[in-house]
Amino acid sequence: MENDPITAFTVGKPFPGPIPHREGAIMELWEMGLTVVIEYPKLRKNELKAFQRGFRSYSYLESPTSVPIAVWVFKFPDPHGAIDSVFNARVVPKDLMDGYLDQTCGMKNQVTFFLLDRAIIRGIKLVALNPEAVELFHETLRKQLGMNYGKSDYEACLGGLFTRTTMELYRMGRVFQYGK
């Protein structure tokens, strides 16, 4: 690790990581912590301003499906709007997931948001989530890790879950306030 090159994240420069295949968000766990990458092709100024103002509430939902899916919905001001992202602990390297779930090093409640216009970084935001929300998330991740399911099982549950709108998912989850 000590010899790994440092990755720079700079507004106005290309994003040096995976980009969502379509407009929307992906949530991943990196060594620096939980990360959400939001891709908005042809990002408008007012959407960027809404991102910069930040979300005022978010919700966390553990899906009631046979494979529990961790669903976050972050409610940004209009016109940016609410974004949802899901997380599957089973696709994360074991050592990284173990480190994230290890609470002896303190609560891991930060999340970094990257807003992209195609591959170009337009905004970066680091926030701290409510520790209760993070504990709910960790409980879901532990359930996922304790189960035996495949990619097709996860995707089947995911498909059924996303017959709902983002705001329906938001209302189904436990809502937390953020900021003022």
Image: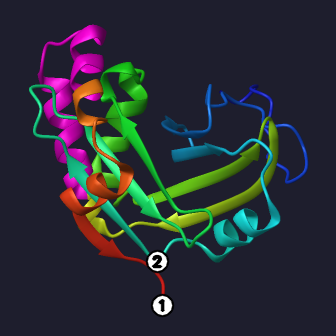
Which image quadrant for residue 37?
top right
Residue labelled with disc 1: 180
Give the number of the disc on residue 56: 2
20 w.r.t. 38: above or below: above
In the image, residue 78 lies in the stretch drawn in magenta: no
Q: Secondary structure at mark 1?
A: loop
Q: Where residue 170 appears, x then y in whole percent?
A: 30, 59
Q: Which residues are magenta?
A: 135-158
Name the quadrant of the N terminus. top right
Identity of the residue drawn at 16% across and 33% down: 68
Magenta stretch, main secondary structure, is: helix
Identity of the residue drawn at 49% across and 36% down: 28
Q: Would residue 52 appear left or right of 129 to someone viewing this image?
A: right
Q: Where residue 128 appears, x then y in whole percent?
A: 46, 68
Foreground of the two, 133 or 106: 133
Identity of the residue drawn at 69% across and 45% down: 40
Which image quadrant for residue 41?
top right
**Could you tell which of marks 1 and 2 lies nearer the N-terminus?**
2
